[in-house]
Amino acid sequence: MSFRVNRRDFLRFAGGGAAGLAASGVTLRGLSTLNAALAAEEVEVPGGPEAWRLSVCSLCPGGCGLRVRTIGKRAVKIQGNPLHPVNRGGLCPRGLAGLQVLYHPDRLRAPQKNVGSREAPQWQEISWDEAIGTLADRLAELNRRGQAHGVVFVGGRCGHQRHRLFQRFLRAYGSPNYLRTPSGLDGAQAAAYLQQGAREGLAYDLEGTRYLLSFGANFLEGWGSPVGAMRAFGQWRDSAAGRRTKFVQVEPRFSLTAARADEWVAVRPGTEAALALGLAYVLITEGLYDARFVSERTFGFEDWRDAAGRTHLGFRSLVLTEYRLNLVAALTQVPVETILRLAREFGRSRPGLALGGHHASTLPGDPYTAMAVHSLNALMGSLETPGGVLVRAEFEAEEPRPSPVRRLPPHLLDPDDTLLPWADLTRLPEAILAGKPYAVEAVLVHGADPVFSLPNGEQLALALQRVPFVVSFASFLDETTAQADLILPDHTDLEKWQEAGSPPTFPVPLQSLSPPVVEPVHQTRDAADVVLALAHTLGGEVAAALPQGSFQEFVRRQVEEIFAAQTGYTFTTSLEETWNRLLERSGWWAPTYSTVEQLWEQIQERGGWWEPNYYYGEWKRVLRTPSRRFEFYSQALARWAAQHVDQARAAGFEPGDDHLCLPHQPPLPESPAEFPLLLLPVEVLPLAGGDGAHLPYLEQIAGPHVFEQWESWLEINPRTAGELGLVEGDRVWVESPRGRAQVRLRLYPGVHPAVVHLPLGYGRTQGSRWGRRGVNPLGLLESQREPVSGHLQITRTYVRVYRS
């Protein structure tokens, strides 16, 4: 059969191809890369038996289940596990990029030690025996000198069981200093602690809510569990369900999340707390709040008297006197009519849900803004109810008892001296440089790059120069690993036993678990197996605390604990899940396994175990405040203020000022004349969490809304650009009091005229050839420690923009 094309057909095909290319957003650079690949020698197709194997994604905190196609010894395709309750077969672009992580040409391939200096490192490959021996000798020497407590372990993105193993190792060794990288949900969790007493496990029933108010949360671009959020969003639009959830996005920028919402409210940057309290004003004055819940389950709504007879300001009085609609509208630049309409819709659409206090997954939000938003949930009675705010009941695993002989010293970043009960990694540089309360002798880092991702990363880099011994378990060279003396490269997800606990905001206990998909590509090892080998080498209490010979044995022990608890089910279809829930609510538990061995095999076959039912109304678990109620007036804040008068004054509160204990709008400094524009970093899904720029697939789709990829860009309002004499595509300088950076200008009408935006995730100086592009906005942004919460927060940083 011959195929002939005349001139007319050729022009028709060419025109159609050009139109398709224009609509696709593919760039000339992308086409040239594609052409080079097509011109290269033909890639050899792997041979061997074909199979599908399960795994778990760790490229974001979501922990989605994966189904990986293998041919012979090679993984060739990734898709979602349809049985996994978090993603039900769906995947975001980050999950699909897992193969580029596995076969990345710039991966660290074997252990290395620095035979040069920290300023001019020279890396030399060594054997695993030498690497583990070097680390064991250093830790044993510190233990002999009584300095074991000077070891710090920084844990980043990895599964719950690995965090558990690392913590157990460190405590058995003699150090309390296990630190986690900060999360953008820290602000919301801080509000839950201050108003509910919940230290962890803040969750939301997204699928069941009827009205969602999102105050700056990048709901569809990296918030919590991205695929879980997208699944809920899809269900809100499901006409077959017979209802539709209204989604309102409140933020100054027209983000992808705002574009997909039913309504975008363009608020003045930094005034989200005032808008939330303005909505509360309408709910209270028009009687739209849940009066019964407020009366029975809250504290501090009305003015009240303490045991000494002193009268305190209540939430109602605060809102009615200081957040009248005309004042809120003037401050937030949101019309009174819009505030009234939103509040009435929210009050009449139950269950309603308000999210806030979070703008990027690596930067904590403002706790007072989070408290103001969370107070809306209390007004609506949306706590411990379907479609509302929940607190996950954690599965209690049995931990070995600590040695009665060894008593651990206080934590290096003693949480007892701060308002919030968890250690803040951003305080580590200060502790290292001060040498107080004791010197840091060694730092071990796994799954994190804090030098790049922390607001004070530059200070941490300087501090690490003073630490005698730094070890990194990274898979790629990064800013933190470049400071190390020893690199012990970790397996990627598909090369190891992979696991994950319940992702952020997920309401029920869950344990994902899957065996390795492929053999290791390079001479790498699972960091968990390395730590277990290290424990056995050190011996004594450390070996006794971790007797398992491999991480597989460690997670097998967790499965035995799950079986002993006699609860939950292995992952299954949605239909069987519904049936299991009905049975359990009727008092029946009908698992598909009867022995530990059967449970172990089913978990590997299906991807994990979970408890699908949430038990509402467990108020003792959900409300752990001094009053055993939701506290509009936080007594934890009052107690802290009484003990830290100077810090309270630094925050602008005199002793006895009740505003410190209530949600309120923080003051907003004005822009200086020489720096007229506010710089706000933004997070895009491909680079969420501050990484992903090392993967070409994610680079290519980083900025579709402005047709930009492969390097940083500056978003600016067209009107503002015109006033500055700038046009689309200009190379410009962005200058702040901290420094300046050169980027390409992109005009975007969805930007507030007084604001410019830079994407997070760019600006690496180490590692992958594709990752060393663009600028890191954190190098331009100013930060200071918020006096009350102790969080290091990005302050309102103003810049000027001019043509380079």
Image (tube, grey):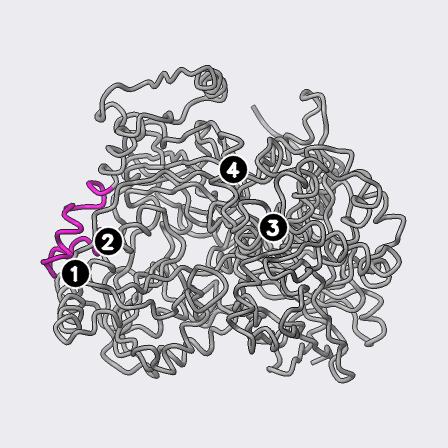
How far, Cα to Cα, is label 1 from label 2? 9 Å
Find out whether the residues at labels 1 and 2 contact each other: C-beta distance under 8 Å: yes
The answer, for residue 394, to whether it is visible in the render is: yes
Secondary structure found at label 1? helix
Residue 619: numbered disc: 4
Residue sitting at x 44%, y 38%: 393
Disc 3 packing (10 Å; few <14; some 14–19; many ≥20): many
Q: CA distance from mark 4 to mark 3?
A: 14 Å
Between residue 71 and residue 411, name the one nearer to us: 411
Sequence-first tag of 3 and 1: 1
- Mark 4 or mark 3: name the one nearer the start of the chain: 4
Q: Secondary structure at mark 2?
A: loop
Q: In terms of sequence position, does the residue under pointer 4 or pointer 2 come before the other?
A: 2
Q: Nearer the viewer, mark 3 or mark 1?
A: 3
Which quarter of the rendered picture does the N terminus lie within?
top right
Above or below residue 47? Residue 444 is below
Q: Amino acid at mark 4?
A: Trp
**Is 619 located above or below residue 268 in the figure?**
above
Report the quarter where the C terminus lies: bottom right
Can you identify the residue that label 2 sits on? Answer: 525
| Dot 1 crowding, Cα within 10 Å, few <14, some 14–19, many 20+ | some
Q: Which residues are magenta?
A: 528-554
* CA–CA distance in space, label 3 to label 1: 54 Å
Q: Amino acid at mark 3?
A: Glu
Residue 128 is tagged as 1
Q: How far across and down, in percent of the image, does residue 686 sit? A: 55, 52
Principal SS element in the magenta part?
Answer: helix
Residues marked 3 and 1 touching at CB (< 8 Å): no
Quarter assignment of residue 361 = bottom right
